[in-house]
Amino acid sequence: MIRINENKMRETAQNMADLRKRNNELKENLSTLFDNIANALKCETGKQIEFIGKEDLIKPLESMDKVLEHMSDTLHILIGEANSSDYPANTYYDRVFAEYNELIISIKNMNQKTEE
């Protein structure tokens, strides 16, 4: 039997959204930090520090944001809370379980035929 804990999935989706928010706050803080350092130095070194900070720290945080967004969206689709026309609310599980039940019935029918 398949058991799905929707509350845990909902909690995990919220945790992903919270993590995404903290990730974006970190990105903004680091971006401001590197901008401030570059402005304070007002020389080529400052520009280099700004470039290194944005390339080495900010871009990976932007990539992480996309991953967290995708994970959160996927969990919302699975628990039937999607905002997408491709996955109307409360339909994903129904499809999965209907197909699962059809598979079980097919397997039982095949077993009965082989036993006869």
Image: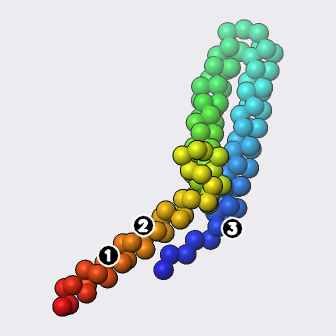
Secondary structure, mark 1, is helix
- Up-down relation of residue 22 to residue 6 (above or below): above
Tag 1: Cα neighbours inside 10 Å, few (<14), some, or many (≥20)? Answer: few
Query: Which comes before the other along the chain, label 2 or label 3?
Result: 3
Instruction: Name the residue: 63% across, 55% down.
Output: 89
Please name the residue shown 43% across and 74% down the image. Answer: 101
Residue name at image x 60 percent, y 45 percent: 84
Tag 2: amino acid: Glu
Q: Is residue 68 visible?
A: no
Q: Find residue 116 and report its horizontal and vertical position in percent.
A: 18, 91
Identify the coloring: rainbow
Mark 2 and mark 1 lie on one chain; the one further toward the N terminus is: 2
Dot 3 surroundings within 10 Å: few (below 14), some, or many (20 or more)? Answer: few
The tag on residue 67 is none
**In the image, what residue occupies the spot 67% across and 9% down?**
44
Q: Depth check: 72 or 19 in front?
A: 72
Q: Which mark is residue 7?
A: 3
Between the residue at mark 2 and the residue at mark 3, the CA separation in whole angstroms equals 23 Å
Would residue 49 appear left or right of 92 to someone viewing this image?
right
Residue 37 percent coordinates (x, y): 77, 21
Residue 16 visible at all: yes
Q: Nearer the viewer, residue 64 or 70?
A: 70
* Picture layout, residue 74 above or below residue 109: above
The residue that disc 2 covers is 99
Disc 1 versus disc 3: distance between alpha carbons?
31 Å
Q: Mark on residue 106?
A: 1
